[in-house]
């Protein structure tokens, strides 16, 4: 039953999404791929759309994937499921267990979870860049246009940092990517 | 105005006008709830940011639930959380009905090919920022390297092992090491 699958899939995402939106992306990728809800292509597009529309990225992705699988109610179920764990946990901490997070065993668990999430996000980023530029390991497909765009995008991150001293906003990077894609894939 | 309606509307505004989620939202929440409406104190805001770092889920949801609960109990928490969710839900639901049609235009499809590359770089960039903020100790570094290497293999060779299992494994290992250290420290103090 699709509603149950959506509910439990996104409940899992909501329970383990430490480290903000980017920490959640590998989890969402896992759930989406193992259920074959979207292909890699569409999921990546949706990450960009979620980044460029208002609201938390996790909520946006849940809404979109739910809607693509089971219309309005699918979107509602997936969104509810992704929000529920953090809602309940915060409620519990503020109402009852004000010191739960200072417990040394909880701290020890956190000490393992946080660096693990960073490793997972790192690996997912590296894999996505590699996949775009040289394809998958069992079907190598070097893509010169993608390599050029990758180099230009990385260069724009560094030059923005150098010239203005500020980080390039994610929405700007997506905009630059869109323009480069339209131009370089257009010719 | 009824506090529940006021919570809902304020957080809807925050949900509607912050792009990119996460930390962009925190400054907007601070602005609205601490400075403008004085619903919570600056210290409360600091506390909830720290708590949000150690709890799962979107940081904006954590802040909304906390502020809503402080102001009006359970109903307040529901109103504030709904406030954050409803605008982005509506926007994305509308987009989901049209995105497929948009992608039929060659120009837009090409633009999305570029966007796809940007997303990969964005995720990598986020990871670099996270590493910079990480405590420079041996154990977290080792856990990060091992789980990163494992996850890369899982992606590349399409192994059937989920990132959640990897996280649980890391948590258990960290807990066991903590307990072993505790036991050896106790033995040390008995020996003296």
Image: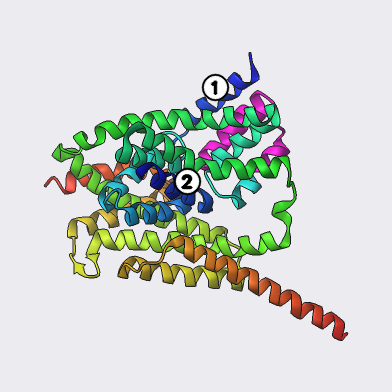
Seen as rendered, the residue at the extreme left is: A187
**Above or below — where is A145 with respect to A5?**
below
Q: Say if residue A158 shows up in the picture.
A: no
Q: Outermost residue, top direction?
A: B1
User: Which residue lies at the image location 56% right of the left edge and 60% below the top edge?
Assistant: A114
- Whether residue B152 is visible: yes
**Residue extending furthest toward the bottom:** B191
x and y percent of residue B135 in the render?
61, 63
- B113 horizontally vs A124: left or right: left
Left or right of residue B19: residue B143: right
**Quadrant of the rendered image containing residue A6:** top left
- In the shown orientation, is residue B107 left or right of residue B78? left
Q: Residue at x 45, y 54 (%)?
A: B126
Q: What percent of the width, then of the height, locates residue A16?
A: 52, 54
Is the C terminus of chain B in the top left, top right, bottom left or bottom right quadrant? bottom right
- Start and end of the magenta stretch? B20-48
Where is residue A131? Give x, y as percent.
Answer: 27, 61
For the residues bearing labels 2 and 1, Cβ distance under 8 angstroms: no
Q: Element at badge 1?
A: helix
Q: Which residue is mark 2?
A: A166
Total labels drawn: 2
């Amino acid at each position: 039953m699709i509603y149950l699958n959506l509910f439990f899939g996104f409940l899992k995402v909501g329970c383990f999404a430490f480290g903000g939106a980017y920490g959640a992306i590998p989890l969402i990728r896992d759930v989406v791929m193992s259920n074959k809800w979207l292909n890699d292509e569409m999921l990546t597009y949706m990450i960009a759309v979620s980044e460029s529309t208002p609201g938390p990225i996790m909520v946006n992705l849940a809404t979109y994937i739910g809607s693509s699988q089971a219309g309005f109610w699918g979107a509602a179920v997936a969104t509810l499921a992704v929000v529920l764990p953090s809602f309940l946990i915060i409620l519990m901490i503020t109402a009852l267990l004000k010191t739960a997070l200072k417990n040394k065993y909880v701290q020890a668990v956190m000490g393992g979870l946080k660096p693990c999430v960073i490793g997972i996000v790192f690996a997912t980023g590296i894999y996505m860049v590699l996949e775009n530029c040289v394809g998958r390991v069992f079907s190598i497909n070097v893509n010169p246009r993608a390599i050029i765009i990758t180099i230009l995008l990385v260069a724009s991150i560094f030059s923005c940092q150098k010239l203005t001293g500020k980080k390039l906003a994610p929405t700007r990077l997506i905009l630059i990517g869109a323009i480069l894609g339209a131009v370089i894939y257009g010719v | 105005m009824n506090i529940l309606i006021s919570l809902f509307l304020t957080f809807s505004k925050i949900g509607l006008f912050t792009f990119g989620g996460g930390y962009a939202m925190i400054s907007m929440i601070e602005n609205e709830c601490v400075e403008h409406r004085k619903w919570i104190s600056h210290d409360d805001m600091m506390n909830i940011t720290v708590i949000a770092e150690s709890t799962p889920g979107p940081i904006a949801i954590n802040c909304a639930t906390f502020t809503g609960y402080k102001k009006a109990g359970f109903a307040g928490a529901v109103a504030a959380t709904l406030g954050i969710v409803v605008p982005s839900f509506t926007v994305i639901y509308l987009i989901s009905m049209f995105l497929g049609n948009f992608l039929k235009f060659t120009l837009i499809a090409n633009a999305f090919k570029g966007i796809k590359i940007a997303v990969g770089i964005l995720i990598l960039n986020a990871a670099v920022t996270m590493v910079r903020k990480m405590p420079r100790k041996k154990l977290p570094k080792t856990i990060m390297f091992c789980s990163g290497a494992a996850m890369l293999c899982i992606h590349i060779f399409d192994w059937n092992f989920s990132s959640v299992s990897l996280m649980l494994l890391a948590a258990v290992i960290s807990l066991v090491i903590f307990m072993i250290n505790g036991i050896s420290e106790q033995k040390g103090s008995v020996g003296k």
